[in-house]
Amino acid sequence: MPIPDSLSDTARQLWGLMNPCLLCPRQCKVNRSEDQIGFCGIADMPVVSSVGPHFGEESVLVGSGGSGTIFFAGCNLGCVFCQNFDISHHRHGRQVTIEQLAQSMLELQRYGCSNINFVTPTHVIPAIVAALELARKNGLSLPTVYNTGGYDSLETLKLLEGYVDIYMPDMKYSDSDVAKELSAAPDYPQINFAAVKEMHRQVGDLQVKDGLATRGLLVRHLVLPDNLAGSFETIDFLAEQISRATTINVMDQYRPCYKASSHPKIDRRPTLKEIVTVRRYAARKGLNVLI
């Protein structure tokens, strides 16, 4: 699709990063505006699987109207245990235009949602920013949430300053071998740690007003069996290199999905003891642990 004339310089820079595609650390270098696809499996226009209020997110995002989620198909990670594999790996959904995406944001605001929550946005962020600019011109005022797997490049993130109010990255692994085996991303730890630093530089610690997040960093960390996620190293990084006031959701939702059964180390749920141990460690390090 041609670049819309109304785009800001920043949005144009993001669009340029798709051709050849250098948007994420994969550096696939395909020309997505010519319908070439790389690891994520998506060309230049986003494929949306669902739009609507979501009441299963963290309470500081939900409020009375729910978090206004827009789920994007495709992903730049290859997680073998993905719980949304039909969206991320099989790419179920429909392609939308920038105008349609902007309209979805405005409809979520009219519905009474607390924010606009972009789920798995990394690989389609040029279209999101273009749509966000259009929606803001037409009255969008809700906080935006960048709900990412955490495999984001610094170049792209720096261009998002001012567009994102709440960064909500996963911090999946602190071990390269585990990241390679489970998500086909051996450089995930160093990429992720650098990305979280940049996110925090932009928005700071999570700010909450009347029970709702308005701005800041909210980290998600999924506990895996046998500490495969490297939970303690991740918590140490947050406490020592980001902020002791970092808000973290230590998640207990892991269950074997997708291709997890072919990986014996993750073919079970974590025990209650494994989960509680991580939460207690995060609290001892001074982090703000969501309940």
Image: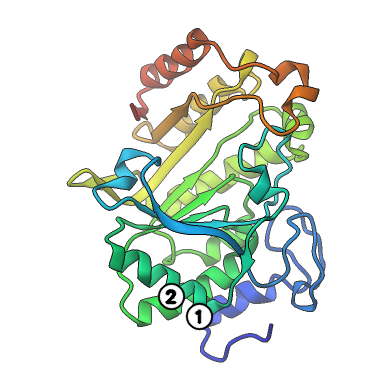
Please give the label number shown on residue 117.
none
Residue 128 picture location, percent across and down: 53, 69
Front-most of 280 and 256?
A: 256
* Identity, as a three-letter code, of the amino acid under mark 1: Glu
Residue drawn 80% across and 24% down?
262
Element under label 1? helix
Near mark 2 (Cα within 10 A), the count class, few <14, some 14-19 or many ≥20, is some
Above or below, 36 relative to 26:
below
* Identity, as a three-letter code, of the amino acid under mark 2: Gln
Residue drawn 56% across and 36% down?
171
Q: Quadrant of residue 175?
A: top right
Q: Is residue 85 left or right of residue 130?
A: right
Above or below, 164 relative to 279:
below
Q: Quadrant of the N terminus?
A: bottom right
Q: Quadrant of residue 177?
A: top right
Please give the label number shown on residue 103.
2
Residue 13 picture location, percent across and down: 62, 76
Kindly identify which residue carries mark 1.
99
Residue 58 picture location, percent across and down: 37, 39
Front-most of 137 and 23?
A: 137
Residue drawn 58% across and 77% down?
97
Front-most of 178 and 239?
A: 178
Q: Is residue 156 left or right of residue 20?
A: left
Q: Is residue 2 left or right of residue 235?
A: right
